[in-house]
Every structure is written in structure tokens, then in C-alpha cells.
Image: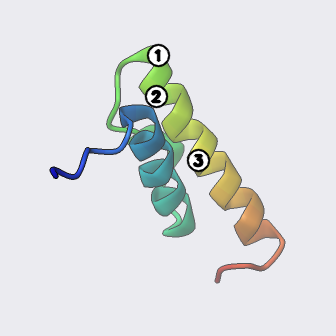
């Protein structure tokens, strides 16, 4: 059975989180669509909050 790709919005959130953990700017969001961009930024914000409380260096 083929493995299905993850949902695009879930993937955008995950990539935004990774970008935030790595200290990238939110201006580096690669998405133009409103839904995918907002999910990427949501992941980015979540990562910055996690960095703020000391989960990542």
C-alpha cells in the first residue's frame, strides 16, 4: 500500500516550526497562498515561543 503524503497545511506548519527553531525570519516564508502561509507562520510563532521558554538554544 502506498504511503500517502501528509496534508500540505500540516507540512507548512512543520516547516515553519523548523524555520523558527533555526532562528530564521518570518519574512523567509516560502508560501504565497493565504492558508499555507498562515500555517507556516503559526508554526514559526510556536517555535519562537518554545525558544523563548528555553526549549531550544
Callout 1 touching callout 3 (CB < 8 Å): no
Against 38, residue 30 (above or below) is below
Is label 1 in a helix, a strand or a loop?
helix
- For the rendered model, the colour scheme is rainbow
Q: Using the image as rendered, state which of residue 18 and residue 22 is in the foreground.
A: 18
Residue for badge 2: 37
Q: How many marks?
A: 3
Q: Which mark is residue 44?
A: none
Residue for badge 3: 43
Residue drawn at (15%, 50%), measured in percent from left and top? Answer: 2
Residue 36 picture location, percent across and down: 43, 27
Q: Using the image as rendered, state which of residue 13 and residue 53 is in the foreground.
A: 13
Callout 2 touching callout 1 (CB < 8 Å): yes
Is label 3 in a helix, a strand or a loop?
helix
Q: Which mark is residue 34?
A: 1
Residue 41 picture location, percent across and down: 56, 38
Query: Label 2 vs label 3: CA separation?
Result: 10 Å
Residue drawn at (42%, 41%), measured in percent from left and top? Answer: 12
Residue drawn at (40%, 45%), measured in percent from left and top? Answer: 11
Query: Label 1 vs label 3: CA separation?
Result: 14 Å
Q: What is the quadrant of the C terminus in the image?
A: bottom right
Amino acid at each position: 500500500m502506498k504511503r500517502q503524503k501528509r496534508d500540505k497545511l500540516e507540512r507548512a506548519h512543520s516547516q515553519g516550526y523548523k524555520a523558527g527553531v533555526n532562528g530564521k525570519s518570518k519574512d523567509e516564508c516560502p508560501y504565497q497562498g493565504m492558508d499555507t502561509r498562515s500555517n507556516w507562520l503559526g508554526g514559526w510563532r510556536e517555535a519562537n515561543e518554545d525558544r523563548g521558554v528555553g526549549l531550544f538554544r
